[in-house]
Image: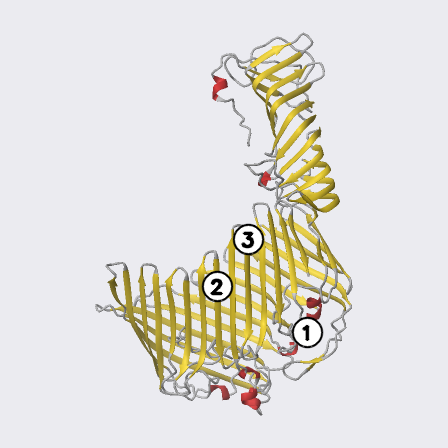
Amino acid sequence: MTVPLWLPTRARRRASFVGATLMAGTALVAPQKMSANTMQRDNSHVIVIGKPTSQTDPLTYLADSESYAKNGLITWDGNVRVWQGDHAMRADRVTYDRSTGILSAKGHVAVVEPDGSTTYADYVEFSHGMHDGIGSGIYIRMEDNAKLAGNGMRRTNGMLNDLTHAVYTACKICEKNPDLPPFWQFQAFDATQDVQHKRLEFDHAWLKMLGLPVFYFPFFSMTDPSVKRQSGFLMPGISPHDRYLGTYFTLPYFWAIDEQQDLTVRGLVSTKTGPELTAQYRNRLNFGSIDVTGGIAYDTHDESRYTNTFGNNVGSSSQYGLQGYVFGRGNFAINRNWQVGANINVASSANYMRDYRVPGYGSEMLNSNLFLEGYGVGSYLRFDGQAYQGLNQGVIRNSDLPWALPRLTYAFQGQPDMFGGRLSVQTTDFNLYRKNGINDQRGQAAIQWDRPFHNRLGQQFLLTARIDSMVYHATQAYQQPTYYTGAGGNHLVGQVQPTIALRMNWPFLRSFAKGHGSQILEPIAQIIAAPNTGNSQNRHLPNEDSLSYEFTDTTLFSLNRYLGTDRLDGGIRANVGIHQNWSWNGHAIDMLVGESFQEHIDHNRLPYSGLEHHLSDPVARLRVSPNQYVDVTARGRFNPWTHQFDYGEGLISTGVPMFRLTGGYVYAPVTPYYYYATNFREYGPNAPYMIKTSEVTGGFSTHWRNYHASGFFRRSLSRKQFVANGGTIGYSNDCFGLDIMYIKQYTRIGGEQRNETVLFNFTFKTIGTFGING
């Protein structure tokens, strides 16, 4: 409860209340005329004791009644309010001894501290104003509902509060039975509240849960709840068992250098390998930010060679011993339109990241770049350099990854012109270097003009005119990722393709269910005309961004269904579809069915593209949400010639807010990699990208009162094995949280498969999170 710093209304109505200002000194003089620094009130008295000193501030008080004794003792009774500087006190009775300068208060004592916290007590004595004193029955309420109590307290210079037989908690006290112990609390022999440095320290403390002691601390120090950041040790971490570290212990230290920068240093000691030291430096500047994390360790794991997915021998002779990593990012504003920055992510080895649980392990690669970005009205420009480091040597050869030095991206979206159209321009140009593979330089530009219009029948048209152009200079084209047989030396090749398209949407709307429902029937038709680019994959044209072809409901009306611009859809083709939607009384059904007609089919696309005939495989999407408890979405592509699905996926979510089930499935006969890892022209159907994807996933989530749980699994039906599974179970209330997480991965990364991981997270409000890895 916050103590009001004003006089209650009922006290104001009493003609006998007394108000005065006391100055530090020795002699009591008769009431004098109120000075300029005295509160102006009717019927108030000013009592000045000497002259103020530099160490103390004047005391101002209000009371219902006042009495004087011959021995120099002044007593104030009833709704007593006392102020000194930033301190304020309330009590039933306050006495002031003019000879000793001691101020005593008892009965519902409450002191509002300068930091906003409130101290309650049965009895207190203050000297030197309200800066030094003692008290009994102490109860201190701080921010975030934190509470500190003790049998007795000694205050020193207004900066240190020493409590005996202290307890601390941030949990709510049971209103019906306040004698019940809180969910957790620290019970200590002694406690010190350092007001100046914003810290709490406990000697010989027990952590008690539901009144039962669970852990003993000879000494425990923590930051005051009112502080958002302060230098000091953070919560340590301990793991009883890890496959690569064994039993390990971590202890971080946080250094708040100033208001804008800090440094966190963490030491790790384990039983199976050498120690590690990591550090994170952060700096938030007026014109940008810096965040750098690095680590160094002596890794003693010397792993043997293994054979990866492609039959290549992979060794780890350089992936032990002295190891380290640096992850850093920085962004700096040059002005309101331009900024420069960098993202640096480098590690000495993937095995080191695995052994020491460095964040990012499990990803395919680490990416580093330097960039310059500019923003304008409808325009964007980025000039950067890209570098990659492969982590999964099971499917990636690090020497095959490209370096983009440099790369230029520019995009422009214009305003509507005099014809009602809108012009857009896009270009991505780069120079790529590979130690093994094609080295090439590309210049590319795409110019597109869109003109929407409609007629009286409600038909909505979009006329699009587009020109794609590109020129490549390449060397070593016989290597990955294109493997052109006999293609050596330098190659200068390019392409220009104009495209014109007209799309028509014709929505029909009707209402039903007495106006509570609506139906939309929307035929969609599109015609696209472009030169037939033919067998473009065999024209010695490099391919850096179009290694996958996607023909689904999402790309049915796309001008180009390749994911990039190195390969383009050409020829004359038409796309048709029917979109329908029903919505009524919280129910919804949405559906799209369509096909594509093409004059030319000799594009040499990836197998199972769905476009092997003049009439494509039909594609469809269906979403059904009959109520708030069920939501189903499915999409796919069906081959009527083989009577099989070439692609399909589905997702279902069902349940009530308290308990929810989810499930998913995905199927694709081709798994294209972001680059071709083997010579697909030589191996044909046996190439790795022909591996079938058929996976099912499932999970659940539930919560009841303070408890929650979730679980998931992912199983590959094509490989007949699980990919990963796990779950979480936990409890949380207003001051405590416990989460137990379990994860098991069955995939192999770097020739190794991790064992199960169990993680315990304990969160104590105002203290922090303590984790244990199993």
Q: Amino acid at mark 1?
A: Glu
Q: Residues within 10 Å of mark 3 (few under 14, many from 20)?
A: some
- Determine the residue positioned at 53% across, 27% down: 4
Q: Are marks 3 and 2 in contact (CB under 8 Å)?
A: no
Whether residue 587 is situated above or below residue 260 in the rendered picture:
below
3D distance between C-alphas at marks 1 and 2: 32 Å
In front: 90, or 479?
90
Q: Position of residue 176 (x, y in %)?
A: 54, 36
Residue position for label 3: 707
Q: Position of residue 192 (x, y in %)?
A: 71, 36
Q: Position of residue 181 (x, y in %)?
A: 63, 40
3D distance between C-alphas at marks 1 and 3: 36 Å
Residue 725, picture quadrant: bottom right
Residue position for label 1: 752
Q: Closer to the N terminus: mark 3 or mark 2?
A: 2
In front: 354, or 546?
354
Q: Across the whole image, how many numbered discs are drawn on residues?
A: 3
Whether residue 626 is situated above or below residue 112 in the rendered picture:
below
Residue position for label 2: 661
Circle 2 SS class: strand
The reply to whether residue 87 is visible in this rendering is no
Q: Residues within 10 Å of mark 1 (few under 14, many from 20)?
A: some
